[in-house]
Amino acid sequence: MKRVLLVNTNLERAPYPVPPLGLCLLADALGARYEVKIYDGVFDGGRNLIALVREFNPDFIGFSIRNIDDVVMDREIFYMDDILEKFIRPVKKITDVPVILGGSGFSIFPAELMAMTGADFGIVGEAEAVLPVLLDRIQQHMDTSDLPCLITAKSPEVQAGLGLEYSAPVQGRFAGIDRRIDFTPYLSKGVYSIQTKRGCAHACIYCTYPLIEGRKFRMRSPSDIATEIEDAHQRLGYITFEFVDSTFNDPEGHAESICREIISRNIKVRLRTMGINPRHANEQLFELMLRAGFVQIDATPDSASPRILKNLCKGFDLVSIERMALMIRKFDIPTMWFFLFGGPGEDEVTFRETLDFIDNFIDPADLVYMNAGLRIYPRTPLYAIAEKEGRIAAGQTVFRPPVYYYSANIAKNRLDQLIRQAALLRHNCIPALETAPLPEMVAEAVEIRKIHQLEEPMFRTLLRIRAKWRREGKI
Ligand code: B12
């Protein structure tokens, strides 16, 4: 049986380490036809990779490239140099088996990463269907040029299938992340990722999700999702499960069905999710989410200015965000809010509109994350806008250095200053550059949580300490 080594090159552990769900799904998809091993670089950082390659002696090596940069302007962590240095180059030095790339970061910049790494093949987007066929064809020395979303070293410019409308159903049953990798380090520091669907039918101008996952929602059945949670819960105990969908409550009704399924099985778990879309947020959803075990959500409206919401093509209006905020307060669901300033048309007036919303609608116990500058990605409407406005040259690469869009209606320094001022006056507003809390603050939070046996999300404890330290003039 041929052997496949799948390498997770993600070295980032902030805001917390994320398990390589995509690679685990691929290992399942390669099934019984291949012997598959996953090397998880998150905690090992490449140290034992070469020994594993020598011992396992794979016939194929796949590298997953998730993060390219951190999307925080002015901090600009660029991950690729380390990925090349710690994983790809050392492996290529000792073996010449075919190297295949994939992952969400790769799917955004496929041609650039093929050139940078010297890989043989790359698959853009989901790979459960294509990867097994590709490996079969390579072994049989067959032509691969008709495979969708495949890029080869010989024709990196042929991005066949990019923007392809995926139609294959998303894998239903799944063996589980912890059955594919050592999940122990994630038990205390991380979460168990759950995907309930693929695709994003929205058209936010800067966003890559539709490019990575396709534009059509393709759902897993609530029963398969609940079974995955139930089984992992039985194996791993009381862990936090996190939904990694672009938006959890889309299309309408799916999130509700998942919650009902979890409730009906009486599974006692901690759940959290990214992206709640205001358009489909309603009281019944929040009620069901609380009953199912949600302890925390993210709300990512990006702006609360009617003009900017329209310019970003968010697909919802201020009224729906306000309605959602009122429900969040009514049900007291701990929420991290994310705002992204500097989009097309942003000026002092629109900035203040968002600030007014923060002041009038967001619980001061909840966190408000303020980022500025929109990362420009290829093949997005924002790229076309930036090109048209002459911010970037026609066809310019935005891979490295990462290029950000800034509204022409407000100077960057002024916007940064407004964000800093807003954060100084509000203990719960955190500028993107200051995301990591002080170690002393974390230590105090841990202590308080232990003494009072607090179950609330860590960010709420930290925010209370932050407010106290501000009052005491410590920060
Ligand atoms: C969920 C998510 C988060 C969650 C993670 C929660 C969790 N428990 O996992 C949170 C909010 C914490 C987060 C944080 C960050 N994220 Co994020 N995140 C995502 C998101 C929406 C989904 C990722 C996911 O789990 N997908 C589901 C799995 C099943 O898919 P997958 O891993 O991609 O695998 C499939 C394919 O890619 C492919 N594949 C994967 N590997 C391989 C390997 C081979 C060889 C092949 C052939 C194929 C292949 O096949 C797989 C199965 O189909 C993506 C956007 C997106 N839609 O992909 C952004 C995304 C990955 N994040 C991004 C970034 C930047 C970050 C942060 C650095 C932001 C920050 N400054 O904090 C951090 C890093 C965190 C970390 N520790 O790594 C960027 C990366 C691009 C870039 N600019 O670098 C993305 C693409 C969003 C974007 N801006 O476009 N993120």
Image: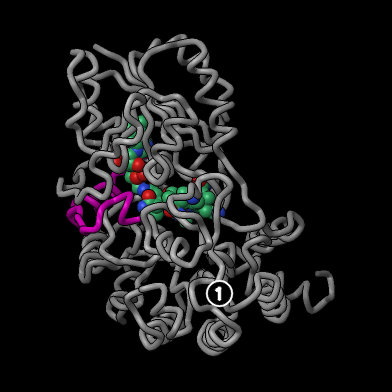
Quadrant into which the C terminus falls: bottom right
Instruction: Tell me the SS state at disc 1.
Output: loop
- 445 in relation to 341, above or below: above
**Residue 380 locus on image (x, y percent):** 37, 58
Give the image quarter of residue 372: bottom right
Q: Residue sitting at 28 percent across and 42 percent down?
A: 126
**Residue 213 locus on image (x, y percent):** 29, 51
- Left or right: where does residue 307 sit relative to residue 131? right
Q: Residue sitting at 58 percent across and 47 percent down?
A: 401
Magenta extent = 209-235
Residue 239 in sight in this render? no
Of residues 191 and 123, the one nearer the viewer is 123
- 253 in relation to 200, above or below: below
Residue wearing tag 1: 366
**Residue 218 locus on image (x, y percent):** 19, 55
Q: Amino acid at mark 1?
A: Asp
What secondary structure prevails in the magenta region? helix
Residue at the outermost right position:
473
